[in-house]
Amino acid sequence: MAEYKFHILVCGGTGCLSSNSHEIADGLKDAIKAAGMEEEVKVLQTGCFGFCEKGPIVKVLPDNTFYTQVKPEDVNEIVSEHIVKGRKVNRLLYVDPENEKHISDAKHMDFYKKQMRIALRNCGFIDPENIDEYIGRDGYQALAKCLTEMTPEQVIEEVKKSGLRGRGGAGFPTGLKWQFAHGYQADQKYVVCNADEGDPGAFMDRSILEGDPNSIIEAMAICGYAIGASQGRVYIRAEYPLAIQRLEIAIAQAREYGLLGDNILGTDFSFDIQLCFGAGAFVCGEETALIHSMEGQRGEPTIKPPFPAENGFWNKPTNVNNVETFANIPVIFLKGADWFSSIGTEKSKGTKVFALAGKINNVGLIEVPMGTTLREVIYDIGGGIKNGKKFKAVQTGGPSGGCLTEKDLDTPIDFDNLVAKGSMMGSGGMIVMDEDDCMPSVARFYMEFIEEESCGKCTPCRIGTKRLSELLKDITGGKGTMEHIAELKRVSQVIRDTALCGLGQTAPNPVLSTLAHFEDEYIAHVKDHTCPAGKCTALLKFKINPEACKGCTLCARKCPVGAISGEVRKPHTIDQAKCIKCGACMDNCKFGAITKN
Amino acid sequence: MAKIKSLEELKKIKEQAQQSVSLRVKGDNIENLVQVRVAMATCGIAAGARETMNEFIKVLNEEHMDNVVVTQTGCMGYCYAEPTIELTMPGKEPVVYGNVDKNKVHEIVEKAIKGGEMLDGIIPVTHNTVE
Ligand SMILES: Cc1cc2nc3c(=O)[nH]c(=O)nc-3n(C[C@H](O)[C@H](O)[C@H](O)COP(=O)(O)O)c2cc1C
């Protein structure tokens, strides 16, 4: 076997791939061949490193050098300088924004310092298309331990003891869920992995599947053993082609090794997994809708109970867990429930993966212990707000969640704390907003999403979300009244109380929480007809400052609707009734005489 | 791929597979390991730095010394004494050795790394490595 001196890891997550990381990997291989060092240097593509903001990422080991924003044309320099001559390529190193120093080891970067990787332990570390690499990282040892040393009851007990709660949104205790499914008798049971991930801006589950698909396979097999199921299904949206491809490769390799199939590791336990593809409807992430979709029916929810544990896929007892929930399972058996439950807060154990997005410097995928504060996530890891703007709010829990503001920044993040603050953990999307974001517009964005995604089965959600969306359109369009605000509250309450499934029941949350924190902003829209953030075009007023206007007539000539008039060398004026708020006048004024607000 | 039929067989595959990821595991933990950095400037390479590096890797593997990691560095400026290496024991100041040929490699592994001794051939460090 060749003794490699270096491993070069190239990020093969979706983000970096779309910035040509494939070409980078191929280019590195070519350059290494040209240098005659193929025997000494191994190049491989891994899953996501998380620091998407600075992608594509290339990491050189064992000296642990972390290169950022690498371009295909940089590969020759990396090989000729770093690999051949031992000189790091400084210009590709991360620069600490605090002191402008180059940092070569990712461990010293603020982005990574406060992180703790359990679910993402192998992402950006192994080649996800090679099962041996997973096995080399203790892969399938947890399954072996469960099958050969533990009874199903003991397996369930261990998961209960770990305190693991579902990462798909609701935070239900995982061990308890397994116990329910275990308790029902049937000739066939199913383990389902929910990889629908429909929250806008979320990419946690996708990254786990792309970076470490075997951890999900192993965990599902453990779950199958615990509840007495020989069949598993992964419900994954067809919009995730790379995750699907890597899962398929992993399943095929696991079958070849006999880690899936009959009599796994020579025991009586048999288990296999198939993939089911979703068409990308948000509601299909709800477990009953998901099950109907897998059965070939319309992706519509049904009332619970009965819960899937009793009556699920093909009416058989079914255990549904989220991808990230499963990703934690093998580690719990390798390191013990006590170790796992030593991390986190009293009622939320372990870590949580978040997809950081919005107006934040370090957009990316992070994993932190439960109990980390929002401030640490946004400022220490996320590097603060883009362009030095002021923080306004952070939306957690996606379209079902709510926003949190400045006064909540020191809240330790866990399931219960976020609910107490009027939002929720959700699956881990975190969208940061700054002073330029208009909150009624944010609510409107989510409501339009929900209106679109409502399956239409129950009236409150189908019609109610449409009404909410219309009210918000009026408010942001300058046609709102105080009556609109009262109506928003009333309709929200009715939807909450009467919708059939979680989608409808939580749909008003973004409205209610933005109203709770930013009612004055709503009032400014309807009473003063202004948008304090300057976002709502319909409410914008372009004005010419007569002191600064030189009467050059340029704006009048640029205005496409002839709304500007005035004599040459005299201050001009804008006819608000004619103005279409295109901003052409302001863009063209050479004297800065035109303002908007 | 043959089927894995028992825990023992899985363990065997794991041991093989572990080697293929061990370089990365080491990199992740580099601060707690003994580091041998071989200077790879043109003069170092001409003087046999590659052979020196290969020898280190070979010996350390034969001895199963997983607590040592071998990396490269740029020119350290001691062209008269190439190949040079920089040895860092965890938590200690680095020490630079010159004229490290194959024999010296064995001596460094046996005495300096295993025994914690200071050997002849240490070059006083006057400036920082050019990276
Ligand atoms: C509208 C809606 C969308 C959902 N989308 C997802 C999803 O994309 N992924 C997911 O794992 N759970 C989703 N859930 C939660 C699931 O119904 C279910 O609770 C979860 O898959 C259980 O797994 P867990 O206990 O491991 O969290 C959604 C729920 C609702 C109401």
Image (spheres, grey):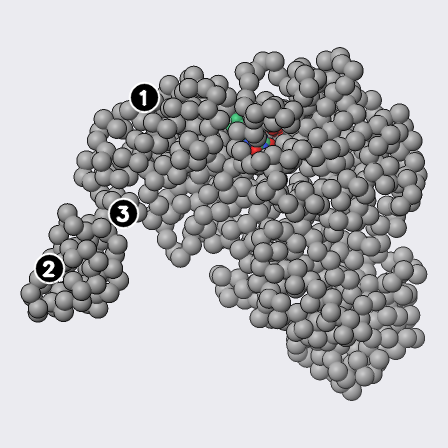
Residue at image point 27% right, 25% down: A486
Q: Which mark is residue A565?
A: 2
* Tag in front: 1 or 3: 3
Residue at image point 58% right, 46% down: A366
Q: Earlier in the sequence, mark 1 or mark 3?
A: 1
Q: CA distance from mark 2 to mark 3?
A: 22 Å
Q: Is residue A54 left or right of residue A395?
A: right
For the image, the number of numbered tags is 3
What residue is disc 3 on?
A537
Give how far across and how far down residue A328 sits, in percent. Answer: 68, 35
Seen from the viewer's position, the closer of residues A320 and A240 is A240
Q: Quarter-wise, where is residue A195 in the image?
A: top right
Say above or below: A50 vs A169: below
Q: Is residue A116 left or right of residue A143?
A: left
Quick check: do tags 1 and 2 share a chain? yes
What residue is disc 1 on?
A490
Quick check: do tags 1 and 3 share a chain? yes
Q: Earlier in the sequence, mark 2 or mark 3?
A: 3
Q: CA distance from mark 1 to mark 2?
A: 46 Å
**Please, which chain is the residue tagged with disc 3 on?**
A
Q: Are marks 1 and 2 in contact (CB under 8 Å)?
A: no
Give how far across and how far down residue A259 sits, in percent. Answer: 84, 36
Q: Amino acid at mark 1?
A: Arg
Q: Name the element at disc 2.
A: strand
**Please, which chain is the residue tagged with disc 2 on?**
A
* Ligand number 1: quarter of image: top right
Does residue B34 show up?
no
Seen from the viewer's position, the closer of residues A73 and A515 is A73
